[in-house]
Amino acid sequence: MKLITSIIKPFKLDEVREALAAVGVTGLTVTEVKGFGRQKGHTELYRGAEYVVDFLPKVKVEVVVPSNLVEPAIEAITKAAHTGKIGDGKIFVSPIEQAIRIRTGETNESAV
C-alpha cells in the first residue's frame, strides 16, 4: 500500500476527485493548505496599498491505495491537475506499513 499526497490548485479538486474515482480510488482526504514553491507568491493591491502574498492557497489530497493502483492514480492526478502553468503542484508517494478500519477491525488493503 502507498500514500499518495498531492498538492494541487484548488479549482482542480473536482477534476482530480473524478479522475481518481474513475481509476478505482474509493476514498480520499482533502485539506486546504497554503504554501509556495517556485511561484514565490505575488503582490496584490488592497485599498490602494500594495502588499505581498507569500503563501498561496492550495489543496492537499491524500489517498491510500493498493500497490497495483499507484501508477494509475498518479497518472489520473497528473492529467486532471495539469494546466501547464507554474504552480500546478506536486505528487509525493510514501509507503504505508499498516492500515486499520476502526469500525470493523479490518486491516491493510481490506481496510482501505
Image (cartoon, grey):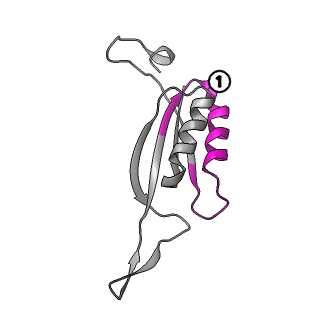
Q: Is 87 located above or below residue 90 in the figure?
A: below
The residue under the point 49% across, 28% down is 96
Q: Quadrant of residue 50?
A: bottom left
Amino acid type assigned to the residue bearing label 1 in the image: Asn
On the image, the x and y values in percent for residue 24 come to: 59, 25
Residue at the limit of the structure toward the bottom, as seen here = 48
Residue 36 can be seen, yes or no: yes
The residue under the point 41% across, 71% down is 54
Q: Quadrant of the N terminus?
A: top right
On the image, the x and y values in percent for residue 39 come to: 54, 69
Q: Is 58 located above or below residue 31 in the figure?
A: below
The residue under the point 46% across, 34% down is 28
Count of residue discs: 1
Q: Is 21 located above or below residue 82 in the figure?
A: above
- As for residue 78 lying within the magenta part, the answer is yes
- As for residue 30 lying within the magenta part, the answer is no
- Judging depth in this view, the residue of 1 and 33 nearest the camera is 33
Disc 1 crowd rating (10 Å Cα; few below 14, some 14-19, many 20+) is few
Residue occupied by mark 1: 68
Numbered range of the magenta stretch: 62-90
The residue under the point 64% across, 64% down is 85
Q: Is 83 located above or below residue 42 in the figure?
A: above
Q: Is residue 100 left or right of residue 23?
A: left
On the image, the x and y values in percent for residue 46 come to: 35, 81
Q: Secondary structure at mark 1?
A: helix
Residue 92 can be seen, yes or no: no
